[in-house]
Image: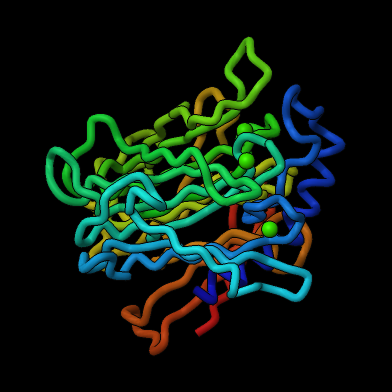
Amino acid sequence: MSRRVSRRHTAAAGACVMALIGATLIATPAGAAAVPAAPFDFNGDGRRDLAIGSPNASVAGHASAGLLSVVFGTAAGLDTNQRRVYSEFPESVPSEPFRNDRFGSSVDSADFNRDGFADIVIGAPGEGGSTGPDEGMAMFALGGPYGFTNWQGVSVAPGNENDRYGESVAAGDLDNDGYAEAIIAAPGTGSLEVWSFAPVEGTSVASKQPRRVERIALPKNGDVGTQAVGAEFFRVDTGDVFGDAGQELVALWRDEQGEDPLGQGNVGMLTWDGGEPSWTEPLQTIGHTLAVGSLDGDAPAEVVIGQYSDGGFAGGQVTVWQQGDTPSRLTGAKKYN
Ligand SMILES: [Ca+2]
Ligand SMILES: [Ca+2]
Ligand SMILES: [Ca+2]
Ligand SMILES: [Ca+2]
């Protein structure tokens, strides 16, 4: 949890910079708020709120069904008296809790429909489907003055057992059209999906329902010409890693049939402008967790990779990569252990 909180604080400065840059470069889409709400400001009062997923929480006797807690920001900081808890119950989330759904495994936010209230996407990678356990699911909800509305669950179609859809989610405006996309990783498929609420062509008003706009495969074993069949783990986040004021998607993954016995992972950046997606050649790395944000307050953003303690470093290790001599290459890894 501390990682996520500190990242969001770091990202806040970047988000302000991005908002200013965005305001000068992008005309306000018709029917949209002049300035979208900052991520995690669900009630649109200008103060960031806190959303915490608890995937291991029991719900009505269902172990690890998972829940989401939201605490609202005030002038005096976070107000724990205003805490709201959401779980997969019809009265809070229109779905049903089951053992090991792990709702809340991943959480991210953006004002997807640009109405001045930040929205949320929540992963439940253990959700069962018609083919068996762990097909996974992600839930969207729109923010508003009185809480979340328009809950909608999405998943891979057709799904398969162990897709683990929603194990990692991210939000960012990848195609620079003024509307943030939601990115949902499905490790078992070796691919991610891009979802959008932006107005469809010929209309000017954003949708209240998300629509799938792209499915993008991971490169297999670091070869951008071939596609991975599955990933043991797969994390996604967004940030301006190239320093060009547009957001890149950063992915950290390990191939299911990776050739490296040490179990090395890959980190790669994806650019997508609504057309053909483009991956950078992945870097080999060791790690399990991923965060992207500007640690020093300026663009480009840094890529931070966390590694558990199973790699010979008691207590684990954190690696920080930054932009190298060409914009799309990461270099100068600094290790902290
Ligand atoms: Ca708020
Ligand atoms: Ca919104
Ligand atoms: Ca966009
Ligand atoms: Ca960029």
| Horizontal relation, residue 304 to residue 90: left or right | right
- Seen at 33% across and 63% down, the residue is 66
- Seen at 23% across and 52% down, the residue is 256
Find residue 189 and report its horizontal and vertical position in percent. 27, 41
Location of residue 29 with respect to 20 vertically, above or below: above
- Seen at 69% across and 41% down, the residue is 246
Quarter of image, res 105:
bottom left
Query: Which one is in front, 155 or 243?
Result: 155
Badge count: 0
Find residue 274 and report its horizontal and vertical position in percent. 56, 25
Quarter of image, res 244:
top right
Q: Quadrant of ligand 1?
A: bottom right
Find residue 329 and report its horizontal and vertical position in percent. 59, 51
Find residue 288 and report its horizontal and vertical position in percent. 39, 66
Query: Which one is in front, 296 or 42?
Result: 42
The residue sitting at the bottom extreme is 314
Location of residue 1 with respect to 160 vertically, above or below: below
